[in-house]
Amino acid sequence: MRSLHPLFVLVALLTVSPALAEDAPKAAEKSQSAEAEKPRCEHGVQKSLCTRCNPKLAAVFKAKGDWCAEHERPESQCSLCHPDLAKKGVK
């Protein structure tokens, strides 16, 4: 019976793996759609995270090291340094 244990484990992994692979794209789609549903400000950023609408948030982004000093906004929201963000609607 002991020699069958690895076989059971292998069969279980092969059975579960395809199910996990199918769920991964669905989870990514859900997170993207949830992100798209969040209210955006006039700058194209999630309203609750916009430092130009709420300057008090700048300290938080600076403390995390996420700050573009040249353009006075978080690096993660700087469409001037990261043109790919402009394609997503960030201004």
Image (cartoon, rainbow, N blue to C red):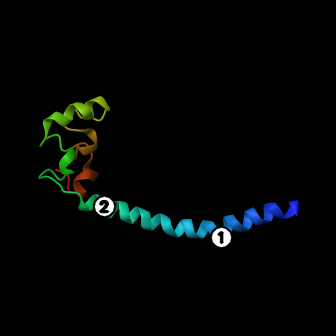
Residue annotated with mark 2: 34
Residue 21 vs 61, above or below: the answer is below
Residue at screen point 18% across, 53% down = 44
Left or right: 51 with respect to 9? left
Q: Toward which corner of the image does residue 62 lie, by quadrant?
A: top left
Q: CA distance from mark 2 to mark 1?
A: 30 Å
The answer to which of 76 and 40 lies nearer the viewer is 40
Question: In the rendered structure, which amino acid carries the disc numbered 1?
Answer: Thr
Q: Mark 2 or 1 closer to N-term?
A: 1
The answer to whether any part of residue 26 appears in the image is yes
Q: Toward which corner of the image does residue 50 lie, by quadrant?
A: top left
Residue at screen point 14% across, 52% down = 41
The answer to which of 78 and 45 lies nearer the viewer is 45
The answer to which of 75 and 42 lies nearer the viewer is 42
Q: Which mark is residue 78?
A: none
Left or right: 29 with respect to 51? right
Residue annotated with mark 1: 15
Image location (x, y in percent) of residue 79: 22, 47
What quarter of the picture does the N terminus occupy? bottom right
Image location (x, y in percent) of residue 19: 56, 70
The answer to whether any part of residue 71 appears in the image is no
